[in-house]
Amino acid sequence: QVQLVESGGGLVQAGGSLRLSCAASGRTFSRCAVGWFRQAPGKEREFVAAISWTGGSTYYADSVKGRFTISRDNAKNEVYLQMNSLKPEDTAVYYCAARGGLGTYYYPTQYDYWGQGTQVTVSS
């Protein structure tokens, strides 16, 4: 069992930066692939970024490529999402998710564990 808690969300002006953290409990987290997803009001949950359990493989949605960076520290059981050059369209609740496996995964249905989400609001 893995429990996830996101933090680091908030209100920021367009062009600003935020760093989201996903803290995990559970002995197997270091063997889990992790993804970040987001959901804006009235929209479906969408993929943002993913990282393999080693951290050696990452993947990004086109909409955030070059602006967001996913990373992890398995010694601390944490995964991060550094978000730069934020835009109003990045406004959403951001969720981290985890699952076992060797790859990176892009669909919400592929993940077994979810955090409660953290709100990110980007003002224009």
Image: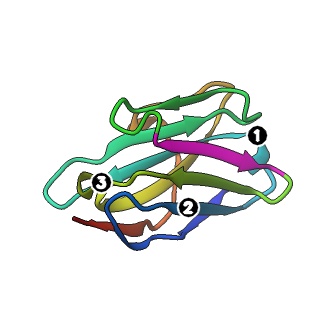
Is disc 2 placed on a helix, strand or loop?
A: strand
In percent of width and height, residue 65 lies at 44, 33
Q: Residues within 10 Å of mark 1 (few under 14, many from 20)?
A: some
Relative to 113, 100 lies left or right: right
Seen from the viewer's position, the closer of residues 89 and 78 is 89
Rounded to the nearest angstrom, the CA distance separating label 1 from label 3 is 33 Å
In percent of width and height, residue 36 lies at 48, 47
Amino acid on which disc 2 is placed: Arg
Quadrant, the C terminus:
bottom left
The residue mark sitting in front, 3 or 2, is 3
The residue that label 1 is drawn on is 31
Mark number for residue 19?
2
> Residue, x 61% and y 60% (percent of image)?
22
In percent of width and height, residue 47 lies at 38, 39
**Contact between labelled residues 2 and 3, with CB atoms less than 8 Å apart:** no
Residue 16 drawn above or below residue 62: below
Q: How is the image coloured?
A: rainbow
The residue that label 3 is drawn on is 87
First along the sequence among labels 1 and 3: 1
The residue mark sitting in front, 1 or 2, is 2
Rounded to the nearest angstrom, the CA distance separating label 3 from label 2 is 14 Å
Amino acid on which disc 1 is placed: Arg
Residue, far right: 75
